[in-house]
Amino acid sequence: MTTTLGRTGIVHDLPEADYHRDLTTLSSTGARILATRTPAEYRHEQQNGRPPKREFDFGHLVHRIILGAGADIVTIDAADWRTKAAKEQRDQAYAEGKTPVLEKDHRRAERIVEAFRDHPTAAGLITNGTPEASVYWSDAWSGVACRGRIDWLRPDVAVDVKTTASSSPAAFAKSVAEYGYHQQAAWYLDGLHACGWEGRDFVFVVVSTTPPFLPFVVRLDDAAITRGRELNAKALERYAECRLTGLWPGHGDTIHTISLPAWAA
């Protein structure tokens, strides 16, 4: 176990680039990698960043319109990315730390946000609060310095906005399991409470990226949050050990005997 005690508190108006540039604290994304993959993969991503993905870019665009904060968006007036001019503008935007999107994608995002604004519960949650609240705390057991960034923070509820192709809350459950959103929810709740936040609720405002762009609001049950906390504890233990030893192992040097997946057996 190692101690990396740092600052504790909620920081507003911190530029997104400054938040992501921090290599001294463990984020929810990092915890999800450490819990389900290897320390070596976490270390590589920490040092090199994640490569841009178009689906992430579109999500950043929707976030920006809904929250009024987040990534800087550059709209490219092109039909697609196949032309040299479009590629050059896209690459320039990435080089400047901005998110490039096509004009047609911007129009689609506007339709998605219009559906969101017509949903009284979803739209009502993005009121009476603050966008992009950065949270810093030290894990009580491991002493690891942690951070999180809440899409929308209110006194009573923390809100995370997700874009998804899922068409229903039940279908979204697969995304929760696949992308570790239950870990994220537990991470943010524990971090906020470590900072003295008195709210108790965490919800996902989910906006569908497929017509008719139906939005919905999801709250994870207690079992999902508990499982998220278990995975976070595993990640924190791994992170503390790696920081202590200076070693970030991969899959080991043994020969792995594997079986066919159940569906192929």
Image (tube, rainbow, N blue to C red):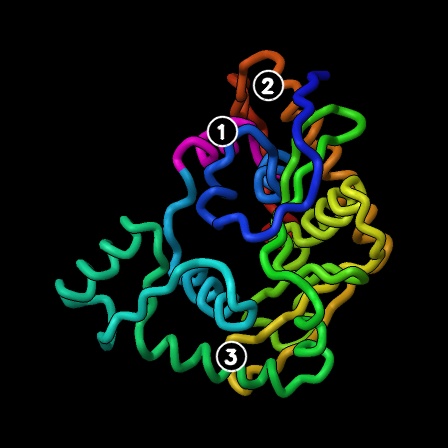
Binning the other alpha carbons within 10 Å of mark 3 as few (below 14), some (14 to 19) or many (20 upward) gives some
Q: Check disc 2 and report the residue beneath it.
A: 243
Residue at image x 75%, y 31%?
A: 139
Q: Check disc 1 and report the residue beneath it.
A: 43
Across the whole image, how many numbered discs are drawn on residues? 3
Q: In terms of image quadrants, where is residue 166?
A: bottom right
Identify which amino acid the numbered label 2 is placed on.
Arg
Is residue 102 shown above or below 141? below
Identify which amino acid the numbered label 1 is placed on.
Arg
* Near-viewer residue (48 or 95): 95
Where residue 123 sits: x, y (%)?
Answer: 66, 78
Residue 174: tell me if it is visible: no
CB of mark 3 within 8 Å of CB of mark 2? no
Label at residue 96: none
Q: Quadrant of the N terminus?
A: top right
Tell me the CA gap for discs 3 and 2.
43 Å
Identify which amino acid the numbered label 3 is placed on.
Thr
Residue at image x 67%, y 58%?
A: 176
Label at residue 210: 3
Left or right of 134 in this view: 143: right
Residue at image x 63%, y 87%?
A: 118
Q: Which residues are magenta?
A: 36-48
Q: Secondary structure at mark 1?
A: helix
